[in-house]
């Protein structure tokens, strides 16, 4: 049997699944699926992620999100009537992670020393460790004002996307053209001052370029694919990818079928058309643009509002991420590059981000 390769997955909505989808992530995948039998939503019973499955998958570290939105889209699983309620829900999601830590399922990683020690333990024990997680935020609605960044930093938040879909207090996001708001510029200045990392995922085109200009700290793209292969504003253009490479970013490949296959329509397009090779195509495109394999990683977004019904056809659970190394080898990738894509690139990124002193800038950018 092949050795399980360590994985760093840069986007998992764990607390959202537990609290909004009411999934007990301490259970096995089979148990969670059985608990959803008979539910009419086509997305139910197709989950791919739980704590036991993360361990089986070899996910040593993940970016685990806070996801609580207040937008005009009014999605019942995402949106709350006010930003204050969204903020309270966000705090509740952090508390969920704390409870999971107390039960031995998770371990918060706040700095590079913690990541380094956790990875060393993972290797020493053959993966018999709790899931190490870096706290991230998908859409900054729970941060009520830029001045609250320090409070969220104390709670352990280390990576922030200013916006999800639509328009937030801070920026325009997926599906809505536009730039940063004045408060968005203040948010980025506050993040830079404490050393919080900017995740450009979901930023609208204008917001993306303004954010790269305003914010000079570490930048990543947690779960993004390539517009050249699958058109749409949710994807990164080649120009954006080159700009991120220049900033030293890593881009995590997402596994949602509509981001992998052109003209895919959820619930209508035959999902058998989508394979793990499509994921490799997007990883390879980024590597070709970069001229090396140092800027690609895994940001699966599995169970980010979809399951096996809208994932590559070979994928049954997150453990099937272990198919990726052989697929990369078949494309001619050297072992060091395979290891980089699976975990090394993300580890190098955080080592660099967290061993550099934070900016001393305190005033908002204009």
Image (spheres, grey):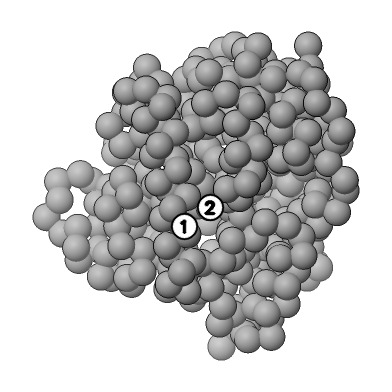
| Mark 2 vs mark 1, CA separation in Å | 9 Å
Q: Is the Cβ of the residue at disc 2 closer than 8 Å to that at disc 1? A: yes
- Counting labels gives 2
Q: Position of residue 151 (x, y in %)?
A: 60, 39
Mark 1 packing: few (<14 Cα in 10 Å), some, or many (20+)? many
Q: Position of residue 128 (x, y in %)?
A: 56, 82
Q: Secondary structure at mark 2?
A: strand
Would you identify the image quadrant in which residue 76 lies?
top left
Picture residue at 34% right of the left edge, 28% below the top: 80
Residue 97: image tag: 1
Q: Is residue 80 above or below residue 332?
A: above
Residues 165 and 187: in front is: 187
Left or right position of 60 against 212? left
Left or right position of 198 against 26? right
Picture residue at 76% right of the left edge, 41% below the top: 195
Mark positioned earlier in the residue sequence (2 or 1): 2
Residue 64: image tag: 2
Residues 89 and 281: in front is: 89
Evaluate whether residue 73 shows in this view. yes
Tell me the quarter of the image containing the N terminus: bottom right
Residues 363 and 290: in front is: 363
Q: Position of residue 255 (x, y in %)?
A: 50, 49
Picture residue at 77% right of the left edge, 65% below the top: 113
């Amino acid at each position: 049997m092949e050795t399980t390769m360590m994985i760093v997955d840069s986007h998992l909505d764990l607390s959202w699944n537990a609290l909004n989808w009411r999934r007990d992530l301490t259970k096995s995948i089979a148990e969670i699926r059985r608990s959803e039998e008979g539910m009419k939503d086509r997305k139910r019973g197709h989950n791919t992620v739980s704590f036991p499955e993360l361990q089986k998958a070899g996910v040593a570290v993940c970016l685990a999100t806070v996801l609580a939105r207040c937008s005009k889209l009014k999605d019942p699983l995402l949106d709350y009537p006010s930003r204050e309620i969204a903020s309270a829900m966000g705090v509740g999601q952090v508390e969920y992670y704390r409870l999971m830590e107390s039960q031995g399922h998770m371990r918060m990683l706040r700095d590079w020393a913690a990541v380094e020690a956790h990875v060393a333990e993972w290797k020493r024990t053959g993966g018999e460790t709790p899931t190490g997680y870096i706290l991230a935020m998908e859409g900054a609605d729970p941060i009520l004002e830029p001045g609250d960044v320090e409070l969220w930093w104390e709670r352990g938040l280390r990576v922030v996307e200013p916006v999800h879909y639509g328009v937030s207090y801070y920026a325009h996001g997926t599906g809505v053209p536009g730039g940063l708001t004045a408060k968005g510029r203040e948010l980025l200045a506050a993040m830079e001052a404490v050393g919080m990392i900017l995740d450009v995922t979901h930023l609208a085109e204008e917001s993306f370029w303004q954010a790269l200009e305003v914010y000079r700290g570490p930048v990543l793209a947690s779960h993004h694919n390539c517009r050249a292969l699958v058109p749409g504003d949710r994807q990164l253009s080649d120009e954006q990818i080159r700009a991120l490479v220049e900033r030293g970013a890593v881009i995590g490949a997402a596994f949602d079928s509509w981001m992998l296959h052109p003209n895919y329509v959820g619930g209508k397009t035959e999902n058998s058309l989508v394979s793990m090779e499509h994921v490799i195509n997007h990883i390879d495109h980024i590597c070709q643009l970069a001229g090396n394999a140092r800027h690609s990683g895994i940001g699966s977004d599995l169970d980010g509002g979809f399951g096996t019904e809208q994932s590559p056809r070979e994928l049954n659970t997150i453990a099937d991420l272990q198919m990726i190394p052989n697929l990369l080898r078949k494309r001619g990738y050297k072992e060091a590059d395979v290891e980089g894509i699976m975990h090394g690139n993300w580890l190098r990124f955080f080592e660099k981000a967290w061993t550099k002193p934070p900016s001393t800038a305190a005033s908002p950018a204009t």
